[in-house]
Image: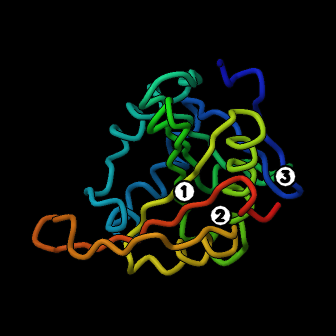
Amino acid sequence: MDLAAVLPLATDRLRLRLFTPGDTDDAYAYQGLEEVARYLYRPPRTRERCEEVIARIATATAWAKDGDTLTLAVCRQGEPGVVGEVRLTLMDAHARQAEIGWIFNPRFHGRGYASEAAQALAALAFDTLAVHRVYARLDVENTASVRVCERLGMRREAHLVENDLDGGRWGSEYIYAALAADLKR
């Protein structure tokens, strides 16, 4: 399936659309922050790296095989600029399993944008893409993302202790998941 036909997505306050090259500075404003990158187990991105990533994901709308990923810019309705992004990756096409994730500029934390955007993306996954199960993997210290998962109605299925090494720091992860019937809509 080509997802371009069902985009953009809209909620009461947000518009979720494909990234464009003009979004580079907005993406760099949060992707370049250490406080954001620490939960992604990678270094902060340079502006050039943000530009490269946006060039790759701006037209990525296939949804058929393992690894296909849809990354959407999250914008406030009627206002310029990108406040964050949401991502859905088809991890197992046969079992219809998808990983969901979100990254937001800290300037916009605490306003419910991540929950609203993730809820819209999960609805797309279940209602349009016939996904059976959506899951999120997150650093246990990322309490804001834990709250997003719980607000969505996802259940904590696993606590992986010191399962990832980021430089010299061991990170532990939670795995949250939901079936279509589990999510609050």
- Report helix, strand or loop for mark 3: loop
Q: Position of residue 135 (x, y in %)?
A: 52, 56
**Which residue does the image show at 83% across and 45% down from the upper left?**
10
**Which residue does the image show at 66% across and 78% down from the upper left?**
110
Residue pointed to by mark 2: 114
Screen quadrant of the C terminus: bottom right
Considering only vertical position in the picture, is 11 above or below 125?
Answer: below
Residue pointed to by mark 3: 11
| Amino acid on which the number 3 mark rests in the picture | Thr
Of residues 61 and 178, the one nearer the viewer is 178
The quadrant holding residue 129 is top right
- Determine which of the numbered discs, if any, sits on residue 102 in the image: 1
Q: Position of residue 181 (x, y in %)?
A: 75, 58
Q: Specify few, some or many for label 1: CA neighbours under 10 Å numbering under 14, 14-19, or 20 or more.
A: some
Q: Position of residue 148 (x, y in %)?
A: 62, 71
Screen quadrant of the N terminus: top right
- Report helix, strand or loop for mark 2: helix
Q: Specify few, some or many for label 3: CA neighbours under 10 Å numbering under 14, 14-19, or 20 or more.
A: few
Q: Position of residue 38 (x, y in %)?
A: 32, 67
